[in-house]
Image (spheres, coloured by chain):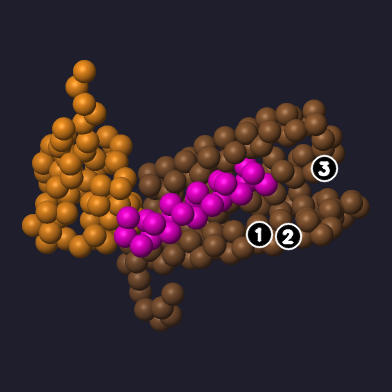
Amino acid sequence: MASGTTLDPAERVDSCSRQRTVLLWLELAAFAIWQVLFVFAHPTDWSQRVMTLIWVAVMLLFIGTGGGLMMRRDLRRVMNDELAVAHRHEAQRWGFWAAMLAGAGLYGLDVFRPVSLPIALHVVLSAGLGLALIRYVWLETRAERGG
Amino acid sequence: MAGEAKLGVRLKDVRTKAGLTQAELANLARVSRKTINTVENGVFIPSTVLALRLASALGTTVEALFFLTD
């Protein structure tokens, strides 16, 4: 953001919107790291589980609201205009179906190979949040690049 | 049965004729420039409310901005 210059509302929203897209990419990277970490060390003790829950809550909050909760109300309203809300709704729809399909898949798999509850929950959460996030990142990046 | 109609968009033409940039129209319609851009490119189909706001900001009708194609 340019310092010492006055941005008009559209430029300011543009700037915030670009920052949100960068943040989405960072969140996607963090999601990938979370998956790698889970492969090597499942969260076992309480502190690890609490950290996982906080991380899931942060992702849900971002996918649910688009972030920017501390922004000025008028800017936030424009940031969360019809296009932004449509992107979030589509991402949530993808996440819902991914979670449902992952759950159904695990239900079927359990007949042949029992799956522990923590792993099943991780798979369902990861499928839902992961696909929602990927879709959200893709839609926002496409719109950022000019539709 | 009739084929599915698609939305044609004249927003860019009307906006440039009005001498407005995407950012200026975005300010008038109280949306982001990204939204104007995606509507102009036909990527995003606006709601009736947004279509009316865009038309109002440009001093024209919704029909002048959008039309159905077969």
- Which contiguous range is marked in magenta? A126-147
Q: Secondary structure at mark 1?
A: helix
Contact (Cβ within 8 Å) of mark 1 with mark 2: yes
Q: Quadrant of residue B8?
A: top left
Q: Which residue is mark 1?
A: A32
The lab-note entry on whether marks 3 and 1 share a chain reads yes
Percent across and percent down for residue A112 are: 80, 31
Q: Is residue A16 above or below residue B12?
A: below
Chain B palette colour: orange
Q: Which residue is mark 3?
A: A118
Q: Chain of mark 3?
A: A
Amino acid at the residue labelled 3: Pro
Task: Report the residue that reaches farthest toward the front.
Answer: A112
Q: Is residue A58 above or below residue A103?
A: below
Percent across and percent down for residue B7 are: 21, 38
Task: Report the residue that reaches farthest toward the right.
Answer: A45
Nearer to us of marks 2 and 3 is 2
The tally of labels here is 3
Percent across and percent down for residue A88 are: 49, 45
Contact (Cβ within 8 Å) of mark 3 with mark 1: no
Is residue A36 toward the left or the right of residue A7 in the image? right
Q: Residue at x 76, y 40 (%)?
A: A121
The quarter of the picture where the C terminus of chain B appears is top left
